[in-house]
Amino acid sequence: MRFHSLPAPSATLALSFFALPLCITAQFIFPPPLNGSISDYTSGKATPTMNFSAGDNMFGGWSTPGSLMSFLVYRCTGSTTAGAKIKPLNSDFNSTVGHLAPDKTWEQMPLYSSIAEMFGNGFDPGRNPIWLHGDFFANNKTTGDLCWFELYTGRDTIAPAEEGGESERVVTVNGDGDWYFATEPFTVHPPRPNNLTVTWKSSGPKPDLFKNHTEAYWADFYSQFPSLERSSSSGPGKESGGYSVILQGPGWIGILALAVALVL
């Protein structure tokens, strides 16, 4: 999964979320916060609001108060005991490679950077918009395809190098810290027919910003989301001139990043 953070000076890339009985002060913009327990979603009692598929994009972010930095963790599961709650982590991360937590959930810090001085792994307090794109790391029989994001306080430390060795950077997230937050889980479905991908925001699924919107694309899009065809003024040949320029014109990625930063 690729993450792209827009204006966050001390972090390079991210997204995340959840709520248990700790002092919760973070607020997520999108996806929405968890309402209930993860086991509600593994049992079928609750249904994810996003029909998310591998390859889709997501625009979201969070806002944190005070002076505490936040750290993003991505988790997945296949099943849990009925009524069980997945507890916050107290885990160390020293790479982007994920691993199984003691509760058998998959845990990963996808934005981890080992470069000692250039990139921090934490996000400054305040608003942190995110663009999430792509291929989820954990989507298999071992870890399951029900995934969510969590946000923690924590610390980012660099261990001194031993003689002849290299210093090691370790990020520790504090599940018993001042606050903890998680998103509503979403199932990562297999790719859609014809490799159709979409962009998700709080307003729902939108045409993929990074695809050429041909008539074939619109046909596939509306076949997946038929209710949008009746309510949308967009469609084959109906994109606004400005929208088309952003998608196809020179330097559109920079324009898009600025536009997203303003929107979020």
Image (spheres, rainbow, N blue to C red):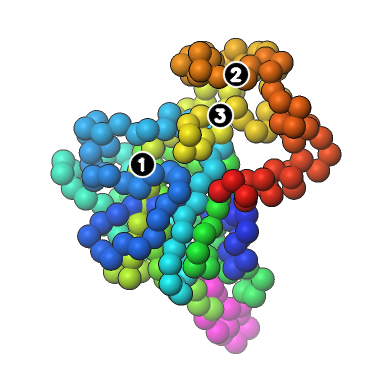
Magenta span of residues:
159-171
> Marks 3 and 2, how far apart in space?
13 Å
Residue 197's place in the image compared with 225, above or below, is below
Q: Main secondary structure of the magenta part?
A: loop
- Judged by depth in the image, the label closer to the viewer, 1 or 3, is 3
Residue identified by numbered label 3: 206
Residue identified by numbered label 2: 233
Quadrant in which residue 139 is drawn = top left
Residues packed near mark 3 inside 10 Å, few (<14), some (14 to 19) or many (20 plus): some
- Rendering coords of residue 236 (x, y %): 67, 14
Reading the chain from its start, which is encountered first: label 3 or label 2? Answer: 3
Mark 3: which amino acid? Lys
Mark 1: which amino acid? Pro
Mark 2: which amino acid? Ser
Residue identified by numbered label 1: 185
**Which residue lies at the image location 35% right of the left edge and 63% below the top edge?**
25
- Rendering coords of residue 77 (x, y %): 33, 43
Look at the numbered discs 2 and 1 and tell me whether their residues touch, using CB distance below 8 Å. no
